[in-house]
Amino acid sequence: MLKITDLVKRYGGGDPVLKDLDLTIEGESVVSIIGSSGAGKSTLLRCINRLVEPTSGSIVLNGTELTKLRGRELRAARRKIGMVFQGFNLVDRLTVMENVQSGRLGYISLWAAVMRRYPKKDIRRAYELMERVGIAQYANTRADQLSGGERQRVGVVRALMQEPEILLADEPTASLDPKTSEQIMGLLRDLASELKLPVLINIHNVTEAKEYTDRIVGMRYGRIIFDDLPAALDQEAMDRIYSGSPHVDRGAELREAS
Amino acid sequence: MTSRPDTWRRPPFIANPVVRWAVYLGVLAYFAWVVATMPIDWTRAAQGIERAGRIFGGAFPPSYERSGLLIDGFLESLKIAILATAGGVALSIPIAFMSARNIAPLPVFYLGRAIIIVARSFHPVIVAIIFVKAVGFGPFAGVLTLVVYSVGFVAKMLAERIEEIDFGQVEAMRAAGAPYASTLIYAIFPQIMPRQIGLTIYQLDSNLRASAVVGIVGAGGIGATLANAFGRYDYDFALAITIVIVGVILISEGVSGQIRKRLA
Amino acid sequence: MSSIAEQFGREDWSRHTPKQKARRFAIFALSALAILWALGSIEIIWPWVWGAPGQMGDLFGRMYPPDPTNLGTILRVLLETVNIATFATALAVVMSLPVAYIAAQNTTPNRATLWLGRLILVTSRSVNTIIWALLFVAIFGPGIVAGIVAIMFRSIGFVGKLLGEAIEEIDTRPVEALEATGASRFKIIVYAIVPQVMPTFWAVSILRWDINLRESTVLGLVGAGGIGIILQGAIDTFNWPEAATVLLSILALVVLGEIVSAFLRRRIL
């Protein structure tokens, strides 16, 4: 279970990007976060695995308070959080197998990592997962030889290799064409139920969010203003989430406050 | 599908195992052989630490007492660099045209390339020794040396640029009935000019660096001052010269980089 | 019916505006002045200049025909020259790795190490191989060791600078992804940074080897080993035919080196 309470993130001295945000994710549900650009979706996700340092508040994953961790403890906690990126973030010049195994880097010794002597168990698991998503034949291919959809599958397998307790996906389909994008969303949904894994997806495409996820969270200017089943997302809610431009509205909010 | 492979090896860089191991062993054997056959006098090298201490002890603090000599040496280096750049660049233009395959007839092309290869292959210090023997000690040998050095670089780069030019423009000029010289001026020069200016500035910077070295074998400039200081065990003066050389090179590199960035 | 030129009074056309013209003229004049200043004040004995073509011709005349009697020794020392260049390049490449790491803004541990790295690079790069050789001959005495160390010292700066720039230009997204997997700093370097820098590493190493081959031919002139010693000896004893043989073998070596490095570059990249 992931429980976020009173989360605030402020860059420099400006207006906070996240404002006293509360969010709880239980069980193995697939949750999508929607909202216009600049609403703070990406910052929220990166606060969870501390790629972005939260200003204040608390994030608890299965009993571990993440915001206070340092060094070795932080790295141990990050292993439990898989992440899939918009730009895939693969190491282009390494083979698919090496990219996939890089998800295990937190677990294996430095020597094994440098010499590419991965444990048998990890190799078997890698082949299983790669076969599951349909990229097993590329194990020895360099990552930059693959198409966008295949690259994102490598990204997904890398995250799953971590044996995560939660999977974060930051706009996983934004760089893909519509058909591939649906395939990846379907894959994420199916994997979540197969592996009993909660998944948190930032997404721009509302249709995909409705079709492939169990719960939709709508964000606007660092606050959650909608949190319900996909069926409850009607036109009125959409208007609230996407109306206005963040810039103008932020100004208006400030004026109201003063 | 229950038995999935549980071993994986990274595809080796050289696929053929025989070739691969031959390369590895060859490299290893080569370095072992180099180390084994190297005529090293270990006692002499061991004494070196002590000598290094003495040299650095003698070099600190750097002495700027004879800064007059230092400034004269630098001005001479600067003059050598300017003249060599002017001469070298002027000479590079015809040689570059000779060495451009799309313009020069084949025999001329080979001649041009041969000139460039010879000019590039010899380190300026070797060229300097020969010129010193031929025309005597002093800055003139330095200028000649750096002219050769400049030709080796500028003519090569320029020839490559000429080979890349858009020939459509040349055809257009020919179609308009322009004579050969006009074609050159209107269709080819504009295409290579920016490159040529950039190269000239780069070469000036480069010549200034090299002029500090060719002096060591007697071709004038600050290098001669440095070699003299070293020869007379004036390590404090030598350090002062080295520091100034480093400073001037850094400044000139910065200035030439700025100018070329602005041009681009 | 009047022509356009008459209507608008535009019969003159010039490529540059007056301001541009003035600037171009100023730059041109400045260059001319610099050349004139250099020509006027340089200490050149002009009769020597007029005699130079004759002297050069005379010198080349004395070099012909090249004398191959000592070819065996020359080739042996030439091989030693190659060894100096190769060995020094290998050492320098290895030693430049940590320097590049601390001199790159995105990997250096802190500001102090960044400046230390940059200081090493600048010192190494700004002092020419020959000057390094002068110093090391004074320290280690004449011989091959001084030559190797001199070439190494100069190459560290060159390789380190280019590698450091390559590190600064890497794609940071894989680094972020591996941070998110909980990998330690060193493993991130091995998996996300090293593979991205590898092509530059090989290209720079080969390039520097090619340059070092040339540099190592002159080390002998200051007593630091290699073919330069034989060349110096031949020139000092006015044995021009042998000097010609040495020069030709250097030419062959350098051309061969360029062919080898072109082959390696094609093979590896």
Image (tube, helix red, strand yellow):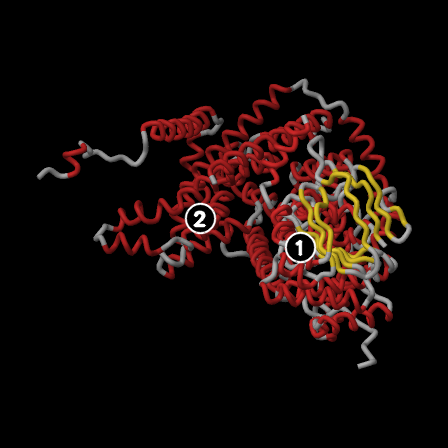
Residue B158 image label = 2
Crowd band around label 2 with a 10 angstrom C-alpha radius: few (<14), some (14–19), many (20+): many
Q: Chain letter of disc 1?
A: A
Q: Dividing the picture into quarters, in which one does residue B220 lie?
A: top right
Three-letter amino acid code at disc 2? Leu
> Secondary structure beneath disc 2?
helix
**Mark 1 and mark 2 in contact (Cβ < 8 Å)?**
no
Name the chain under label 2.
Answer: B
Q: Residue C68 or C195: which is nearer the viewer?
A: C195
Q: Residue at x 62, y 50 (%)?
A: A236
Left or right of B189, for residue A121: right
Q: Is residue C224 visible?
A: no
User: Mark 2 vs mark 1: same chain?
Assistant: no
Seen as rendered, the residue at the extreme left is: C1
Left or right, residue B116 beside residue B123: left
Q: Which percent across, then down, holds residue A171? A: 67, 55
Q: Looking at this view, is A239 or B127 the one in front? A: A239
In the image: residue A121, left or right of residue C47: right
Question: Which residue in the protein does label 1 denote?
Answer: A233
Q: Residue at x 56, y 52 (%)?
A: C247
Res. A61 in view:
yes
* Residue C107 percent coordinates (x, y): 74, 44
The local secondary structure at tag 1 comes to: loop
- What's the residue type where badge 1 is placed? Leu
The mark closer to the camera, 2 or 1, is 1
- Label 2, label 1: how far apart the Cα atoms are: 66 Å
Outermost residue, bottom side: B1
Crowding near the residue tagged with mark 1, few <14, some 14–19, many ≥20 C-alpha atoms within 10 Å: some
Compared with residue A207, is residue C40 higher up or lower down, i.e. above or below? above
